[in-house]
């Protein structure tokens, strides 16, 4: 969530952030409710303080007055009785005032909190403005030796490409029919060498992160409480994408949700904790099964392994000091990690700077990495697909947005409590990444050369088919 103090002092920053992210949040309404709420709280605190003061003072005073009452004349007794009644009535009136404030807060706080949770993290100042992915800006691209983006696959390799759908069927790597039979559309079964290749990719990536990048591997829950989804910023805006397990209907204390990324579990580890400065940065990675409903994706990539409901992903997160320069340096390292992995797999790719309209609620900056997939795109004059980039990775900076929601803090050099900064990155996601691996490494006879770095995780198998 955003800093309310910052919102009050610089409301235009957040109005512009909502506009630039192409979202709809009534900032002025939030400010009005926030002001009303603070006024009620001030009134309530004043009443409570007065209530406490009178409570300490009125008892002895009433006792003294009652002692005088016994020997007082009728006129004085009337005055004393009136004074005692006044002293006894004041705490009752203050109690009623506190209760009234409680009721008024209960009436406005749901809307106040709801609006507050919807305000997105404003984009970083240097993020280009745009409405959506079509306005993202290419930063650079890379291709293995012998690959020319200006030429078709056939011109590069001397034969027409098969799509990954054709390749997995030819070699028995994936069984879509039985996956759909068991679980419905966008499900599949990894079989034989397909499963081994899938696992090889994940194992290569997790070992890469631990051995070469110094990240600590963690195994985290993929079934979490709602607070964890809210804390990491996936709720309320992304609720429709999550699978909901209604445990409360069956008598449990809380419902559960299947996570769409290991980021949720990794970031939730230290919720409501105060970290020592020397513990930062936290450098965690995980491999986890991810679940996404793909709501709103009807008709998009319905065939194949590109857009599916269940997949596995190696994810990395960094929690660092509240320092923009340090955050940007980690962001650059995350992109370097992805490039090292993709280059070692011999996959062509490009980096895209996401525009403001494609950042989502929680990110202040995001770089997407798209791999070249020869089997995607329109059908060319030669009857073969023209090829197309497809997103396989994404690296994001979140500022303190996530840590503020998670109440994840640290003490700085002066002992002051501060919210940490967070970053996350897709190290590898499979089986989507198998699409470019199979299609880019296919041979004229339909066989597929296994990238050398994956062979140790496949028992030395160098070729499929």
Image: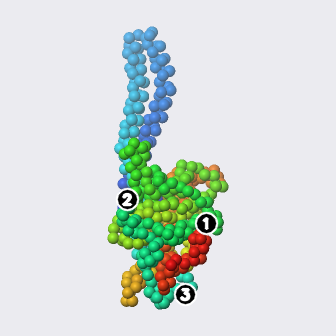
Residue visible at 40% across and 14% down in the picture: 77
Q: Residue 9 at what x, y percent from top left?
A: 47, 56
- The residue tagged 1 is 207
First along the sequence among labels 2 and 1: 1
Q: Looking at the image, do the residues carrying marks 2 and 3 touch, with CB atoms under 8 Å apart?
A: no
Residue visible at 44% across and 66% down in the picture: 189
Q: Looking at the image, do the residues carrying marks 3 and 1 touch, with CB atoms under 8 Å apart?
A: no
Quadrant of the rendered image containing residue 11:
bottom left
Q: Looking at the image, do the residues carrying marks 2 and 1 touch, with CB atoms under 8 Å apart?
A: no
Q: Residue 156 at what x, y percent from top left?
A: 49, 88
Helix, strand or loop for disc 2:
helix
- The residue tagged 2 is 240
Residue visible at 53% across and 55% down in the picture: 220
Q: In this view, does 415 lie above or below 78?
A: below
Q: In terms of depth relative to the viewer, which is nearer, 265 or 157?
A: 157
Q: Is residue 397 above or below residue 379?
A: above
Q: In terms of depth relative to the viewer, which is nearer, 128 or 463?
A: 463
């Amino acid at each position: 969530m955003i800093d309310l103090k910052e919102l009050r002092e610089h409301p235009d920053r957040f109005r512009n952030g909502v506009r630039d992210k192409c979202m709809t949040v009534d900032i002025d309404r939030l400010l009005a409710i926030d002001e009303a709420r603070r006024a009620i709280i001030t009134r309530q605190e004043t009443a409570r303080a007065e209530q406490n003061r009178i409570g300490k003072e009125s008892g002895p005073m009433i006792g003294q007055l009652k002692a005088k009452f016994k020997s007082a004349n009728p006129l004085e007794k009337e005055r004393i009785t009136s004074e005692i009644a006044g002293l006894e009535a004041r705490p009752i009136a203050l109690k009623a005032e506190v209760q009234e404030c409680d009721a008024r807060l209960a009436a406005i706080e749901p809307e106040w909190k709801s609006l507050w949770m919807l305000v997105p993290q404003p984009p970083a100042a240097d993020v280009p403005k745009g409405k959506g992915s079509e306005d993202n800006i290419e930063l650079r691209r890379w291709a293995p030796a012998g690959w020319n983006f200006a030429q078709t696959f056939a011109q590069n390799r001397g034969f027409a490409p098969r799509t990954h759908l054709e390749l997995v069927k030819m070699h028995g790597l994936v069984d879509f029919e039985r996956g759909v039979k068991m679980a419905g559309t966008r499900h599949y079964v990894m079989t034989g060498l397909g499963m081994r290749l899938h696992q090889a990719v994940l194992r290569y990536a997790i070992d890469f992160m631990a051995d070469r990048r110094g990240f600590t591997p963690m195994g985290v829950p993929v079934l979490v409480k709602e607070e964890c989804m809210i804390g990491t910023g996936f709720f309320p805006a992304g609720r429709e994408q999550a699978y909901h397990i209604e445990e409360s209907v069956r008598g449990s204390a809380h419902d559960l949700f299947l996570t769409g990324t290991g980021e949720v579990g990794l970031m939730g580890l230290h919720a409501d904790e105060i970290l020592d400065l020397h513990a930062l940065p936290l450098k965690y990675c995980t491999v986890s099964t991810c679940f996404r409903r793909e709501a709103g994706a009807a008709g998009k990539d319905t065939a194949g392994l590109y857009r599916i409901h269940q997949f596995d992903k190696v994810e990395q997160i960094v929690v660092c000091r509240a320092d923009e320069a340090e955050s940007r340096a980690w962001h650059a390292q995350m992109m370097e990690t992805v490039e090292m992995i993709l280059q070692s797999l011999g996959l062509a790719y490009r980096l895209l700077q996401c525009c403001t309209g494609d950042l989502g609620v929680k990110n202040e900056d995001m770089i997407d990495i798209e791999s070249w997939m020869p089997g995607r795109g329109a059908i060319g004059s030669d009857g073969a697909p023209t090829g197309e980039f497809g997103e396989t990775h994404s690296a994001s900076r979140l500022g303190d947005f996530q840590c503020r929601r998670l109440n994840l803090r640290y003490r700085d050099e002066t002992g002051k409590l501060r919210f940490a900064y967070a970053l996350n990155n897709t190290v590898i996601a499979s089986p989507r990444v198998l699409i470019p691996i199979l299609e880019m490494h296919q041979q004229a006879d339909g066989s597929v050369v296994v990238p050398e770095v994956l062979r140790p995780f496949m028992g030395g198998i160098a070729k499929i088919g």
